[in-house]
């Protein structure tokens, strides 16, 4: 049976349909999950997609962490459920404390949209477990607040525990240690700024994002 | 009511109505209008809303054709593009708001055009922004430029509609009056098509979205329908207009889009109409007039965000992110449920009423009360607001020195001592702008900004499956149109068709945004009339209906008009989109071929970027446009590239049309895109390098003989220019430039002008 993947929709989310399309391309059975939902336990994985949840009011993710679905998401993650936050989803996961650090404004203080090359830095996350470390992928970024920042202690921990999942080949935004994506200690919660779904067909110029999504949907709740 | 004491300006004039227009209102009402009614007529009869100076000319445009479901006059043009899908398209200006408050002005322009699209039941899928500023060496221009681009990015990105292209022009002629146009394209299952028509007396009139405030009062009249006073466009009187600019909230609009599309899908609304220019007055009177019904409004029911608003303020506020919906009473509860889910405010503010007997035919009246059962404070025939404005046939006159200006062509200028330097100065790409725009959302963008045209999958949430693609382009050229508005506008239509062909698309329709100066200047009216004639000629010859348009007049400052600036938005269709088109970058070893109309090259240089920007000469005549030959060239290119995107072909490695900057710049752009140089020759000196003669497309191929045969069969000339390869671009003995220098000139132009290092550093 195809793995069931929930794609969370807050008011202001805008990448949900794109993520559903890309997940379907790798054989998943994707469904939209409204932010008021309080149960996720029927799902095999959850994606928090990009966009502007609650208008990014205050700062990205700051209001979304209070949406009802976030309690369910925390419980889902706590029992090992695979959770991936893409772009705004990454920002939401850091605000909710599911991932450490924060995303601050890009170095040039501008929105940046375009292709970006990243290297898989670790294969121990649910998003990269089928991809050898060192693999270069052509994805896309699309954000204003995409520059990862954290304390020196957290950075040391992320490195020691092999939790930096993706690094930019050429740092576009001043992100600390070229970080494009990280995971939690267990490897089942991943946040990344680049959009795998935007690299999901030859027509769009890259299929590299499918490699990541295949890793995700190949993994169910233990 | 319109009394004036002493030297106080009469109210109607302060609101923007002439004495004659006041008389016309009195005629319609059979009495003096009160303050509220006067305010309503002033906004609806403003140039911006009524097109009173341009309507008699716009009537000359062809508007019908196969596939046209909705033509001009509605919120957007709609075309059947096959597979049960219709495309809605519209373009508008937001020039004056952007001139006084660039960020909010541009952002609200984006918001407004998006509402026009989902009003028709279409999901907005793509935006394009043609922008015109003065040179960036002026600090004020940098402020305007960064503000406008930032405003478009902030709104478009957050509202979730990708910006897939546009135009960028820097010219001293726009220093005092920048232009910000925005085009939106959406798509819908044909069955969801709705028109902004009220019907069913007894139905509820419902306001959706943001509460009403004092922002944007008089936007259409004070701001959009009068020129700027200050010689620098920033005098105190002009700055005082900043409160007439609205404030944008893309998050409110995003929820409004989702809620309205859901309401339409569920059949819970009879019609929706956006509140834009002239606010509630416009939305109520237009929906009532189109439906031939009346409407009663209760202003106490209008949700507000400012205390103590007068009725005329509520009726003319241009607060953004509001929609008017016509709802059958039995659907109200279900509507409230949908709106609550999307956190969209909904309030019943009135009812649709029966048209009333009158001399002639029944008249739908718009009646306004300040509270339920209260006295009627405005009572006017709805259609007199929407369609009753006078239509002016304003005086027109060509410029007195037209003959001498046309006689002085830049062909007589001495050839450049250094063509390469001129070419490098013309290079410059707009990536600094479009990298700030989300141009990829919906996974539709096969060719995004920077290409000849944008090419999108015809797909989106809620649409039936399709293998087709749609292509979009916006084209403007104030240099051409200043030399000859008629021929220049015809060339723009031709340019749009050629751009669409370069991504494999067949053009099916155009929209236009006519940006001109003060219509009370006879020369400006002549320019407008000429431009419309040129557009009509080209569209008729190329079989293109004009399905919508916008006219922006009073683009002047200190009495100086902008050059005539019609903008053409072109829509094309690709029958089968399976593979990315070849793009502009050639491969080493490819033969570079120029497809062109039969006959010797046209070496006319009038209106060219070389003449205007490098030699400061804006006179002369434009190269000739043979519309029949153009159609043959464009059809051949659309066929060749169409075969590539359908997954076959193999004849075209790279393709780029020749436009502003001439063949020289087209070749330079192809080299930059490829990262590969070329050795080319056989050109007739600098004139053939820089002429912007139409109907020419550069194609790179590995099968030149086959390409030549196809061209010959199609009645198109094909001339081999040379071969791509190496890291130098060489053209005869006139151009020799290292690829690295060319790339640096192109990529560095805007960042350098802004004092920045550029993307990612």
Image: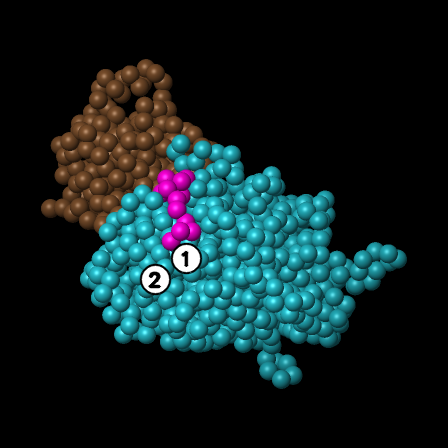
Chain colours: A brown, B cyan
The residue beneath circle 2 is: B594
Q: Chain of mark 1?
A: B
Q: Earlier in the sequence, mark 1 or mark 2?
A: 2
Q: Which residue is mark 1?
A: B663
Residue B712, placed above or below residue B568: below
Q: Which of these two is toward me, A6 or B115?
A: B115
Q: Position of residue B430 (x, y in %)?
A: 44, 46
Q: Estimate the x, y position of residue B149 in percent, counting from the top left.
A: 50, 45
Q: Quadrant of residue A127?
A: top left
Magenta span includes B736: yes
Q: Residue shown at 34%/62% (left/top)?
A: B594
Residue nearest the viewer, comparing B572 with B750? B750
The local secondary structure at tag 1 comes to helix
Q: Is residue B221 above or below residue A4?
A: below
User: Residue A69: horizontal and vertical position, in percent?
Assistant: 32, 37
Q: Is residue B50 magenta?
A: no
- What is the magenta range? B732-744
Question: Residue A12 sits in which quadrant?
Answer: top left
Measured in 3D between alpha carbons, the distance from the residue under mark 1 to the one under mark 2, in whole angstroms, is 9 Å
Q: Residue at x 79, y 63 (%)?
A: B2
**Residue displayed at 14% across by 46% down:** A2
Report whether B496 appears left or right of A171: right
Mark 2 element type: strand
Q: Is residue B416 above or below residue B684?
A: above
Q: Is residue B225 left or right of residue B116?
A: right
For the C terminus of chain B, give its image quadrant: top left
Q: Chain of mark 2?
A: B
| Spot occupied by residue A123 in the image (x, y as percentages of width and height) | 17, 29
């Amino acid at each position: 049976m195809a793995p069931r993947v929930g794609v969370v929709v807050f008011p202001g989310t805008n990448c949900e349909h794109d993520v559903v399309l890309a997940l379907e391309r790798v054989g998943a059975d994707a469904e939209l999950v409204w932010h008021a939902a309080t149960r996720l336990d029927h799902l095999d994985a959850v994606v928090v997609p990009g966009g502007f949840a609650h208008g990014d009011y205050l700062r990205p993710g700051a209001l979304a962490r209070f949406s009802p679905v976030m309690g369910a998401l925390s419980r889902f993650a706590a029992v090992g459920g695979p959770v991936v936050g893409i772009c705004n989803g990454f920002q939401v996961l850091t605000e909710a404390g599911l991932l450490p650090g924060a995303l601050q404004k890009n170095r040039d203080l501008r929105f940046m949209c375009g292709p970006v090359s990243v290297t898989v830095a670790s294969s121990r996350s649910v998003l990269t477990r089928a991809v050898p470390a060192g693999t270069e992928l052509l994805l896309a970024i699309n954000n204003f607040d995409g520059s990862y920042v954290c304390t020196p202690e957290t950075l040391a921990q992320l490195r020691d525990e092999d939790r930096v999942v993706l690094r930019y080949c050429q740092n576009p935004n001043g992100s600390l240690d070229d970080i494009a994506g990280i995971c939690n200690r267990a490897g089942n919660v991943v946040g990344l700024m680049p959009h795998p779904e935007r690299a999901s067909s030859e027509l769009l110029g890259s299929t590299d994002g499918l490699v990541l999504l295949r890793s995700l949907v190949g993994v169910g709740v233990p | 009511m319109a009394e004036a004491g002493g030297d106080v300006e009469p109210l109607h004039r302060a609101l923007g109505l002439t004495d004659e227009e006041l008389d016309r209102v009195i005629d319609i009402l059979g009495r003096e209008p009160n303050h509220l009614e006067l305010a309503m007529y002033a906004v609806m009869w403003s140039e911006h809303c009524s097109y009173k100076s341009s309507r008699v000319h716009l009537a000359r445009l062809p508007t019908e054709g196969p596939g046209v479901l909705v033509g001009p006059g509605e919120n957007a043009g709609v075309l059947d593009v096959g597979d049960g899908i219709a495309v809605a398209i519209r373009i508008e200006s937001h020039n004056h708001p952007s001139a006084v408050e660039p960020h909010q002005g541009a952002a609200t322009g984006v918001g407004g055009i998006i509402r026009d699209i989902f009003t028709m039941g279409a999901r907005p899928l793509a935006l394009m922004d043609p922008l015109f500023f003065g040179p960036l060496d002026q600090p004020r221009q940098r402020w305007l430029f960064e503000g406008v681009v930032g405003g478009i990015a902030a709104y478009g990105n957050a509202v979730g509609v990708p910006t897939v292209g546009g135009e960028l022009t820097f010219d001293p002629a726009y220093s005092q009056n920048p232009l910000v146009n925005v085009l939106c394209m959406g798509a819908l299952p044909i069955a969801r098509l709705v028109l902004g028509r009220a019907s069913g007396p007894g139905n509820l009139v419902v306001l959706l979205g943001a509460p009403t405030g004092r922002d944007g009062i008089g936007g259409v009249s004070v701001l959009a329908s009068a020129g700027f006073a200050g010689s620098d466009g920033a005098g105190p009187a002009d700055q005082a207009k900043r409160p007439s600019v609205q404030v944008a909230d893309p998050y409110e609009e995003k929820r409004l889009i989702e809620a309205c599309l859901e309401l339409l899908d569920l059949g819970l609304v009879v019609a929706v109409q956006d509140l834009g220019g002239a606010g509630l007055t416009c939305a109520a009177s237009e929906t009532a007039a189109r439906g031939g019904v009346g409407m009663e409004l209760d202003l106490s029911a209008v949700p507000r965000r400012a205390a103590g608003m007068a009725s005329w303020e509520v009726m003319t506020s241009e607060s953004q992110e509001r929609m008017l919906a016509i709802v059958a009473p039995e659907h109200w509860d279900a509507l409230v449920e949908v709106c609550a889910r999307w956190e969209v405010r909904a309030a019943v503010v009135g009812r649709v009423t029966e048209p009333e007997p009158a001399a002639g035919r029944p008249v739908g009246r718009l009646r306004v009360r300040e509270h339920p059962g209260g006295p009627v404070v405005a009572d006017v025939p709805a259609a007199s607001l929407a369609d009753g404005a006078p239509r002016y046939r304003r005086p027109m006159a060509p410029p007195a020195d037209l003959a001498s200006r046309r006689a002085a062509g830049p062909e007589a200028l001495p050839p450049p001592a250094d063509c390469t330097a001129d070419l490098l100065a013309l290079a410059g790409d707009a990536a600094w702008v479009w990298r700030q725009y989300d141009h990829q959302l919906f996974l539709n963008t096969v060719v995004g900004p920077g290409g000849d045209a944008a090419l999108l999958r015809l797909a989106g949430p809620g649409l039936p499956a399709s293998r087709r693609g749609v292509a979009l382009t916006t084209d403007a050229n104030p240099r051409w149109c200043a030399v000859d508005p008629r021929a220049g506008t015809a060339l723009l239509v031709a340019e749009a068709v050629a751009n669409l062909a370069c991504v494999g698309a067949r053009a099916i329709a155009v929209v236009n945004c006519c940006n001109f100066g003060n219509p009370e200047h006879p020369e400006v009216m002549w320019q407008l009339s000429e431009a419309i004639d040129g557009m009509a000629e080209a569209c008729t010859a190329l079989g293109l209906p004009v399905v919508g348009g916008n006219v922006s007049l009073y683009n002047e400052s200190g009495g100086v008009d902008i050059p005539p600036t019609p903008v053409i938005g072109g829509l094309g269709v690709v029958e089968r989109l399976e593979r990315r088109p070849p793009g502009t970058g050639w491969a080493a070893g490819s033969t570079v071929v120029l497809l062109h109309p039969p006959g010797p090259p046209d070496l006319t240089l009038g209106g060219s970027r070389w003449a205007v920007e490098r030699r400061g000469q804006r006179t002369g005549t434009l190269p000739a446009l043979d519309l029949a030959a153009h159609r043959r060239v464009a059809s051949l290119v659309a066929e060749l590239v169409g075969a590539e995107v359908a997954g076959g072909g193999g004849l075209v490695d790279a393709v780029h049309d020749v436009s502003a900057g001439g063949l020289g710049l087209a070749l330079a752009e192809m080299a930059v895109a490829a990262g590969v140089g070329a050795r080319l020759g056989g050109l007739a000196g600098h004139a053939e390098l820089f002429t912007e003669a139409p109907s020419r497309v550069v194609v790179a191929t590995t099968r030149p003989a086959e390409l030549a045969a196809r061209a010959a069969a199609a009645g198109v000339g094909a001339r081999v220019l040379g071969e791509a390869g190496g890291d130098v671009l060489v053209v005869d003995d006139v151009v020799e430039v290292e690829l690295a220098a060319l790339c640096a000139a192109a990529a560095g132009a805007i960042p350098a002008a802004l004092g920045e290092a550029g993307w990612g550093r």
